[in-house]
Amino acid sequence: METDAVAIIGPQTSIMAHVLSHLANELNVPMLSFLALDPSLSPLQFPFFVQTAPSDLFLMRAIAEMISYYGWSDVIALYNDDDSSRNGITALGDELEGRRCKISYKAVLPLDVVITSPREIIDELVKIQGMESRVIIVNTFPKTGKMIFEEAKKLGMLEKGYVWIATTWLTSLLDSGNPLPPKNTESFRGVLSLRIHTPNSRKKRDFVARWNKLSNGTVGLDVYGLYAYDTVWIIARAVKSLLDSGANISFSSDPKLTSMTGEGSLNLGALSIFDQGSQFRDYIVNTKMSGLTGQIQFLPDRSMIQPAYDIINVVDEGVRQIGYWSNHSGLSIIPPESLYKKPSNRSSSNQHLNNVTWPGGTSVTPRGWVFPNNGRRLRIGVPDRASFKDFVSRVDGSNKVHGYAIDVFEAAVKMISYPVPHEFILFGDGHKNPNFNEFVNNVTTGVFDAVVGDIAIVTKRTRIVDFTQPYIESGLVVVAPVTKLNDTPWAFLRPFTPPMWAVTAAFFVIVGSVIWILEHRINDEFRGPPRKQIVTILWFSFSTMFFSHRENTVSTLGRLVLLIWLFVVLIITSSYTASLTSILTVQQLNSPIKGVDTLISSSGRVGFQVGSYAENYMIDELNIARSRLVPLGSPKEYATALQNGTVAAIVDERPYVDLFLSEFCGFAIRGQEFTRSGWGFAFPRDSPLAVDMSTAILGLSETGQLQKIHDKWLSRSNCSNLNGSESDEDSEQLKLRSFWGLFLVCGIACFIALTIYFFKIVRDFCRHSKPEEEAAATLPSPESSRSKTLQTFLAYFDEKEEDSKRRLKRKRNDDHSVRPPRPV
């Protein structure tokens, strides 16, 4: 810089890059590095610092996708305490978090240049041996990396079950050896590593040949040598572009640095500002060329275009490439350059790698974790219940446990492909049921490695632990005393509600009356004394239900009304029959408590099981006053409290209630479950064992073993199970609102028939009354005329139609006989 440099290639470490980039900013001198690839070296903070190789951000993204591809969730990071290694691991943590993975432990080693003995490395490796995760990421430098693997081999950490992933330092070390002899790769066998991908090209092959000739094969060429060569060409092209633009290269003094002349030994006053530095930097970042490393081009964020990596597996015979990673398509076994012309496809089904030889020589992908502390038996917490002991309980005062939950857990463990050494530890005093929130919380504090039992999966608990797949469905229900309703001689009335009975009966009368009106003048069956006519109306209407041929004895209008009424009656009758059948075959239970809504609106006391989450749920979610809640400890206390009226109902989880109802009669579940959940086993957050146990529980369900365990412990009954056959009377009754449409249709038909009939009879009456009016000699007063007309109409209406016609005909004949002859 004292000699007025226009660009600097370097530095080789991120530590130096962070320091010198501030000076490059001050002097407007571009600084290009193919080794200082720290993701935190942002172009916004350091505009004159340019990374000419892919940032380690992409390296960490590739490793994160590899971890996700193999199904691991926890990893351990081993790195030096320098900017590059530390910031790289930070970027890895961010990438893993987006894939539901995490770094469970960070093992920090001293700087690479100050490590003189393996003591610090051994201490960290011993710690790692006792941890759960077996996936170890080594982000360091060649010197430290070699020491790590040498000590790991001595400690037996390169055997079956371990996964080691080394960053690009390992491939750089192996490539620079040209190649390393097999004895030098022994400490790395089974390790995965990555190398920046450079496409195979003639230009690259020719350069490697010239390099080997120049060095006589004594110095290997790694990928960073290719990037160094391309970096020189980037600067050369930028200089040419600057000169071709007509610019003159000039420098000027920096007043800030000139004032510091003579201070210390840095001679800062000799440094000058590159006047064309900004323009020159722009030519650099706008470079587009084909180099030894492939297409060279910078994106707007100054990252390299199309970053990609080779994924390497160290094997007995050296190294073997198992695939590629590119920012375009993720993991593949096809070179990235052949995929760039296709649309990006990052779906899981499109991610592929070839088989790997893992540490220990196995080709089976390690599960990536073991039980901590070198296989110590898992401490499994079990509730020492005072009631409902069929689910889990102590065996005869010993420390052994048995029950439904225990059998499910043991059966699931047997289905896992690896041994799960464990021991059960009781929680509680056995005199009362323990608090299950405290029980589950002991997993987070390390008291238990997991807890097993009748543990409800609720939101509050899922925030602190991971649950397995539910092994039994559950949910809160209301249980209350009930009485049977079908032991009564009036059971046949229950299918209809009172309004339904009233409207149905009214329509029988209405339809009968309409038929009487339509048929009274023309049908002899509808004539006679009033008592006879009333009986005829009722009999004709009701008999339609049983004798469909009755409509054949009436007129056309009457037949239309009867057909519609018959249709309505048939539908109502079939519904009545189905409802009555259901009522008489299914036990009908009566209780003032219809469900949770009735419970909330009432003022009665509510029982709950000691230790259950039902208490907090009723207070927090249902807003039931705490003063209304009564804690109960056993099924016998349930029955006693319900029978003597201490509580109006009990709220508890469905499995407990089913077991209670199998022993005590006279009670039933009212309404539906108003929460939906299940019971599961709780493990620490992100525990891989929870995933494997969930898979095992699903297997138990699919093979029928889960149901067999359920039947063994929970399928018994000492009385008829009201719960399974309960039918709420209200739900079985036929309500008026379900049939009002039918009644409306029938009513409209009656109205139309009456209207037609009314106009017909008025027309006939007018024809009948006209001759009589002409025969009248005197005109009465209007009032008496209207009265006489009404009386005449009613008499005409009551008269049989044939008689009216016969009388009218006779009247006309008489008038004709007495009429004087027409004059000639």
Image (spheres, grey):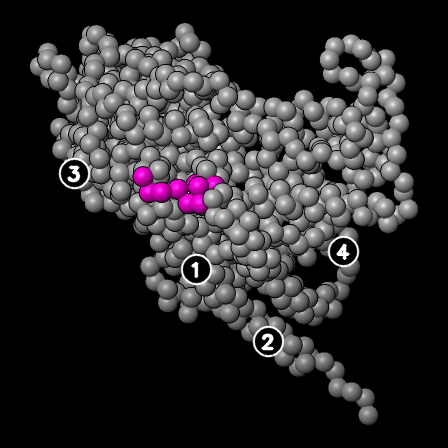
Q: Main secondary structure of the magenta part?
A: helix
Q: Give x and y (percent) for residue 582.
A: 29, 44
**Amino acid on which disc 3 is placed:** Lys
Task: Give the quarter of the image for residue 457.
Answer: top left
Residue at mark 4 to residue at mark 1: CA–CA distance: 51 Å
Q: Are marks 3 and 2 in contact (CB under 8 Å)?
A: no
Gap in angstroms between the C-alphas marked 2 and 1: 44 Å
Instruction: Classify the position of the N terminus by image quarter.
Output: top right
Locate residue 607, reporting x and y percent: 32, 14
Image quadrant in which you'd find residue 117:
top left
- What stretch of residues is rendered in magenta? 174-183
In the rendered structure, the answer to whether residue 500 lies left or right of residue 228 reads left
Q: CA distance from mark 4 to mark 2?
A: 25 Å
Q: Which residue bears the numbered disc 3?
A: 708
Which comes sooner in the sequence, label 3 or label 2? 3
Say whether residue 308 is visible: yes
**Badge 1 element:** helix
Q: Identify which amino acid the numbered label 2 is placed on.
A: Arg
Q: Residues within 10 Å of mark 1 (few under 14, many from 20)?
A: some
* Alpha carbon distance from label 1 to label 3: 52 Å
* Residue 656 image offset from top left, x and y in percent: 25, 24
Q: Nearer the viewer, mark 1 or mark 3?
A: 3
Q: Residues within 10 Å of mark 4 (few under 14, many from 20)?
A: few
Residue at the spot of label 1: 567
x 33%, y 34%: residue: 187
Q: Which residue is mark 2?
A: 810
Judged left or right of residue 643, residue 606 is right
